[in-house]
Amino acid sequence: MTSEWAGSLLLGAVVLSGATVQRLTGLGFALVAAPALVLLLGPADGVVLSNCAAGAISAVGLVDGWRAVRPGAMLPLVGAAAVTVPAGSWVAGRLPEPVLLVGIGVLVGAAVLLVLRGVRANALRGAGGAVAAGAASGFMNASAGVGGPALSLYAVNAGWTMREFVPNAQFYGVVVNAFSVAAKPLPHLASSAWLLGAAAIAGGAAAGRALARRVPEHGARRLVLLLALAGGLSTLGKGLWDLRP
Protein backbone atom coordinates (compact mmCIF):
# COMPACT_ATOMS: atom_id res chain seq x y z
CA MET A 1 0.00 0.00 0.00
CA THR A 2 1.40 3.41 -0.97
CA SER A 3 1.80 6.16 1.62
CA GLU A 4 -0.81 8.19 -0.29
CA TRP A 5 -3.45 5.50 0.13
CA ALA A 6 -2.43 4.87 3.74
CA GLY A 7 -2.89 8.55 4.52
CA SER A 8 -6.20 8.59 2.66
CA LEU A 9 -7.45 5.57 4.60
CA LEU A 10 -6.57 7.24 7.90
CA LEU A 11 -8.32 10.40 6.79
CA GLY A 12 -11.35 8.35 5.73
CA ALA A 13 -11.46 6.67 9.14
CA VAL A 14 -11.51 10.05 10.87
CA VAL A 15 -14.31 11.31 8.62
CA LEU A 16 -16.25 8.05 9.13
CA SER A 17 -16.12 8.40 12.92
CA GLY A 18 -17.15 12.05 12.79
CA ALA A 19 -19.99 11.39 10.33
CA THR A 20 -21.28 8.53 12.49
CA VAL A 21 -21.52 10.59 15.66
CA GLN A 22 -23.01 13.56 13.77
CA ARG A 23 -25.80 11.37 12.37
CA LEU A 24 -26.23 9.69 15.76
CA THR A 25 -26.46 12.81 17.94
CA GLY A 26 -27.23 15.68 15.54
CA LEU A 27 -23.96 17.41 16.40
CA GLY A 28 -20.35 16.43 16.85
CA PHE A 29 -18.65 15.88 13.50
CA ALA A 30 -16.26 18.79 13.93
CA LEU A 31 -15.68 18.15 17.63
CA VAL A 32 -14.56 14.59 16.95
CA ALA A 33 -12.94 14.97 13.54
CA ALA A 34 -11.55 18.53 13.35
CA PRO A 35 -8.67 18.07 15.84
CA ALA A 36 -7.59 14.84 14.12
CA LEU A 37 -7.87 16.39 10.63
CA VAL A 38 -5.83 19.37 11.80
CA LEU A 39 -3.10 17.05 13.08
CA LEU A 40 -3.16 15.03 9.83
CA LEU A 41 -3.32 17.88 7.31
CA GLY A 42 -2.26 21.00 9.18
CA PRO A 43 -4.55 23.75 10.47
CA ALA A 44 -5.48 25.32 7.12
CA ASP A 45 -6.44 22.21 5.13
CA GLY A 46 -7.73 20.35 8.21
CA VAL A 47 -10.23 23.08 9.11
CA VAL A 48 -11.48 23.49 5.54
CA LEU A 49 -11.91 19.75 5.08
CA SER A 50 -13.78 19.62 8.38
CA ASN A 51 -16.08 22.39 7.12
CA CYS A 52 -16.67 20.51 3.84
CA ALA A 53 -17.46 17.19 5.51
CA ALA A 54 -19.56 18.71 8.30
CA GLY A 55 -21.66 20.58 5.76
CA ALA A 56 -22.15 17.43 3.69
CA ILE A 57 -23.21 15.24 6.63
CA SER A 58 -25.54 18.00 7.86
CA ALA A 59 -27.17 18.05 4.40
CA VAL A 60 -27.66 14.27 4.58
CA GLY A 61 -29.33 14.58 7.99
CA LEU A 62 -31.49 17.48 6.83
CA VAL A 63 -33.13 15.32 4.14
CA ASP A 64 -35.27 13.66 6.85
CA GLY A 65 -35.93 16.71 8.99
CA TRP A 66 -36.16 19.83 6.83
CA ARG A 67 -39.86 20.29 7.63
CA ALA A 68 -38.99 20.90 11.29
CA VAL A 69 -36.57 23.76 10.58
CA ARG A 70 -37.66 27.07 12.14
CA PRO A 71 -36.52 29.80 9.69
CA GLY A 72 -37.46 32.66 12.02
CA ALA A 73 -35.35 31.26 14.86
CA MET A 74 -32.43 30.47 12.57
CA LEU A 75 -32.21 33.85 10.81
CA PRO A 76 -30.37 35.77 13.60
CA LEU A 77 -28.03 32.81 14.19
CA VAL A 78 -27.13 32.41 10.52
CA GLY A 79 -26.98 36.16 9.89
CA ALA A 80 -24.55 36.76 12.77
CA ALA A 81 -22.39 33.82 11.69
CA ALA A 82 -22.20 35.20 8.14
CA VAL A 83 -20.67 38.40 9.54
CA THR A 84 -17.96 36.70 11.62
CA VAL A 85 -16.95 33.88 9.25
CA PRO A 86 -14.66 36.21 7.22
CA ALA A 87 -12.96 37.36 10.44
CA GLY A 88 -12.32 33.76 11.49
CA SER A 89 -10.91 32.93 8.06
CA TRP A 90 -8.68 36.03 8.14
CA VAL A 91 -7.27 35.14 11.56
CA ALA A 92 -6.67 31.51 10.59
CA GLY A 93 -4.85 32.55 7.42
CA ARG A 94 -2.39 34.83 9.20
CA LEU A 95 -1.38 33.05 12.39
CA PRO A 96 1.74 30.83 12.41
CA GLU A 97 0.83 27.13 12.36
CA PRO A 98 1.94 26.32 15.96
CA VAL A 99 -0.02 29.31 17.30
CA LEU A 100 -3.07 28.24 15.31
CA LEU A 101 -2.78 24.70 16.69
CA VAL A 102 -2.70 26.08 20.23
CA GLY A 103 -5.69 28.30 19.49
CA ILE A 104 -7.71 25.43 18.02
CA GLY A 105 -6.87 23.20 20.99
CA VAL A 106 -7.91 25.88 23.47
CA LEU A 107 -11.15 26.67 21.61
CA VAL A 108 -12.14 23.01 21.34
CA GLY A 109 -11.30 22.28 24.98
CA ALA A 110 -13.11 25.35 26.33
CA ALA A 111 -16.17 24.72 24.15
CA VAL A 112 -16.43 21.10 25.26
CA LEU A 113 -16.15 21.99 28.94
CA LEU A 114 -18.85 24.66 28.61
CA VAL A 115 -21.21 22.22 26.87
CA LEU A 116 -20.49 19.48 29.44
CA ARG A 117 -21.41 21.89 32.23
CA GLY A 118 -24.54 23.06 30.38
CA VAL A 119 -23.73 26.70 31.09
CA ARG A 120 -26.81 28.91 31.45
CA ALA A 121 -26.68 32.67 31.03
CA ASN A 122 -29.21 35.42 30.33
CA ALA A 123 -26.91 36.67 27.56
CA LEU A 124 -27.63 33.47 25.61
CA ARG A 125 -31.42 33.92 25.57
CA GLY A 126 -33.69 35.70 23.12
CA ALA A 127 -32.69 37.49 19.94
CA GLY A 128 -29.56 38.93 21.54
CA GLY A 129 -28.47 35.46 22.62
CA ALA A 130 -29.03 34.13 19.11
CA VAL A 131 -26.86 36.89 17.63
CA ALA A 132 -24.11 36.33 20.22
CA ALA A 133 -24.16 32.55 19.71
CA GLY A 134 -24.19 32.86 15.92
CA ALA A 135 -21.31 35.34 15.93
CA ALA A 136 -19.18 33.15 18.19
CA SER A 137 -20.08 30.04 16.22
CA GLY A 138 -19.25 31.58 12.84
CA PHE A 139 -15.85 32.78 14.00
CA MET A 140 -14.99 29.43 15.62
CA ASN A 141 -16.24 27.46 12.62
CA ALA A 142 -14.08 29.37 10.14
CA SER A 143 -10.98 29.56 12.32
CA ALA A 144 -11.03 26.18 14.11
CA GLY A 145 -13.75 24.11 12.42
CA VAL A 146 -15.86 23.87 15.59
CA GLY A 147 -18.96 26.06 15.43
CA GLY A 148 -21.39 23.60 17.03
CA PRO A 149 -20.80 24.18 20.76
CA ALA A 150 -21.96 27.82 20.66
CA LEU A 151 -25.16 26.72 18.90
CA SER A 152 -25.63 23.95 21.46
CA LEU A 153 -25.26 26.38 24.37
CA TYR A 154 -27.82 28.70 22.79
CA ALA A 155 -30.26 25.81 22.35
CA VAL A 156 -29.87 24.80 26.02
CA ASN A 157 -30.58 28.36 27.18
CA ALA A 158 -33.47 28.78 24.72
CA GLY A 159 -35.09 25.61 26.07
CA TRP A 160 -35.10 23.71 22.79
CA THR A 161 -35.98 20.04 22.94
CA MET A 162 -33.76 17.53 21.16
CA ARG A 163 -36.51 17.06 18.56
CA GLU A 164 -36.30 20.80 17.81
CA PHE A 165 -32.53 21.03 18.03
CA VAL A 166 -31.42 18.31 15.61
CA PRO A 167 -33.05 19.52 12.33
CA ASN A 168 -32.24 23.17 13.07
CA ALA A 169 -28.62 22.28 13.88
CA GLN A 170 -28.42 20.38 10.57
CA PHE A 171 -29.77 23.40 8.69
CA TYR A 172 -27.33 25.69 10.47
CA GLY A 173 -24.48 23.29 9.68
CA VAL A 174 -25.25 23.32 5.97
CA VAL A 175 -25.43 27.12 5.70
CA VAL A 176 -22.55 28.14 7.97
CA ASN A 177 -20.16 25.50 6.66
CA ALA A 178 -20.97 26.70 3.14
CA PHE A 179 -20.00 30.22 4.24
CA SER A 180 -16.79 28.90 5.80
CA VAL A 181 -15.77 26.89 2.74
CA ALA A 182 -16.49 29.81 0.42
CA ALA A 183 -14.20 32.06 2.47
CA LYS A 184 -11.10 29.86 1.99
CA PRO A 185 -9.40 27.84 -0.76
CA LEU A 186 -10.19 24.13 -0.89
CA PRO A 187 -7.53 21.78 0.53
CA HIS A 188 -5.08 20.20 -1.91
CA LEU A 189 -5.77 16.50 -1.43
CA ALA A 190 -5.16 13.41 -3.52
CA SER A 191 -8.14 12.11 -5.47
CA SER A 192 -8.07 8.98 -3.29
CA ALA A 193 -8.59 11.15 -0.18
CA TRP A 194 -11.62 12.89 -1.69
CA LEU A 195 -13.05 9.53 -2.81
CA LEU A 196 -12.59 7.85 0.56
CA GLY A 197 -13.87 10.95 2.36
CA ALA A 198 -17.09 10.88 0.35
CA ALA A 199 -17.51 7.16 1.00
CA ALA A 200 -16.88 7.73 4.71
CA ILE A 201 -19.60 10.39 4.88
CA ALA A 202 -22.11 8.01 3.29
CA GLY A 203 -21.01 5.12 5.50
CA GLY A 204 -21.09 7.25 8.64
CA ALA A 205 -24.58 8.52 7.85
CA ALA A 206 -25.84 4.94 7.49
CA ALA A 207 -24.02 3.71 10.61
CA GLY A 208 -25.20 6.63 12.74
CA ARG A 209 -28.79 6.13 11.66
CA ALA A 210 -28.61 2.44 12.56
CA LEU A 211 -26.92 3.07 15.92
CA ALA A 212 -29.48 5.75 16.85
CA ARG A 213 -31.99 2.97 17.53
CA ARG A 214 -29.64 1.17 19.94
CA VAL A 215 -27.43 3.73 21.70
CA PRO A 216 -28.83 5.91 24.52
CA GLU A 217 -28.69 9.55 23.41
CA HIS A 218 -27.21 10.92 26.65
CA GLY A 219 -24.40 8.36 26.72
CA ALA A 220 -23.58 8.95 23.06
CA ARG A 221 -23.35 12.72 23.51
CA ARG A 222 -21.10 12.38 26.54
CA LEU A 223 -18.78 10.02 24.66
CA VAL A 224 -18.60 12.47 21.75
CA LEU A 225 -17.65 15.32 24.08
CA LEU A 226 -14.99 13.28 25.87
CA LEU A 227 -13.46 12.25 22.53
CA ALA A 228 -13.54 15.87 21.44
CA LEU A 229 -11.80 16.96 24.65
CA ALA A 230 -9.06 14.40 24.07
CA GLY A 231 -8.61 15.64 20.49
CA GLY A 232 -8.48 19.25 21.59
CA LEU A 233 -5.85 18.51 24.22
CA SER A 234 -3.78 16.58 21.66
CA THR A 235 -3.90 19.53 19.26
CA LEU A 236 -2.97 21.92 22.06
CA GLY A 237 -0.04 19.68 23.03
CA LYS A 238 1.21 19.52 19.44
CA GLY A 239 1.07 23.30 19.12
CA LEU A 240 2.91 23.86 22.39
CA TRP A 241 5.58 21.30 21.38
CA ASP A 242 6.10 23.09 18.05
CA LEU A 243 6.46 26.43 19.85
CA ARG A 244 9.47 25.24 21.82
CA PRO A 245 12.54 27.45 21.29
Image (spheres, helix red, strand yellow):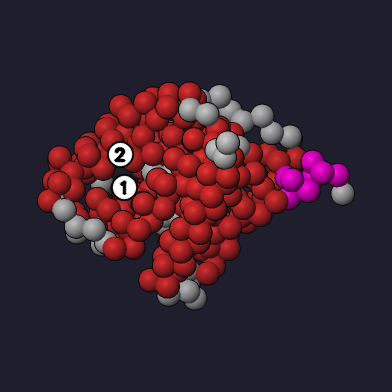
Q: Which label number is shown at residue 81?
A: none
| Residue sticking out furthest to the right | 1
Residue 70 image offset from top left, x and y in percent: 25, 46
**Where is residue 82, by image quadrant?**
top left
Q: Amino acid at mark 2?
A: Ala
Query: Within 10 Å of the Cα at label 1, are there few (<14), some (14-19), or many (20+) other Cα atoms?
Result: many
Residue 238 image offset from top left, x and y in percent: 57, 46
According to the picture, the residue beneath numbered tag 2 turns out to be 136
User: Which residue is at 29% across, 63% downward?
Assistant: 117
Which quadrant holds the C terminus? Answer: top right
Residue 220 or residue 212, whichever sits in front? 220
**Where is residue 142, by image quadrant?**
top left
According to the picture, the residue beneath numbered tag 1 turns out to be 150
| Residue sticking out furthest to the front | 245
User: Which residue is at 52% across, 29% downward?
Assistant: 96
Query: Within 10 Å of the Cα at label 2, are there few (<14), some (14-19), or many (20+) other Cα atoms?
Result: many
State the extent of the magenta-drawn residues as a range. Answer: 2-9
Where disc 1 sits, the SS reads helix
Is 85 rendered above or below residue 59?
Answer: above
Q: Is residue 122 left or right of residue 139?
A: left
Residue 221 image offset from top left, x and y in percent: 41, 65
Residue 225 or residue 173, whichever sits in front? 225
Q: Earlier in the sequence, mark 2 or mark 1?
A: 2
Residue 111 or residue 208, whichever sits in front? 111
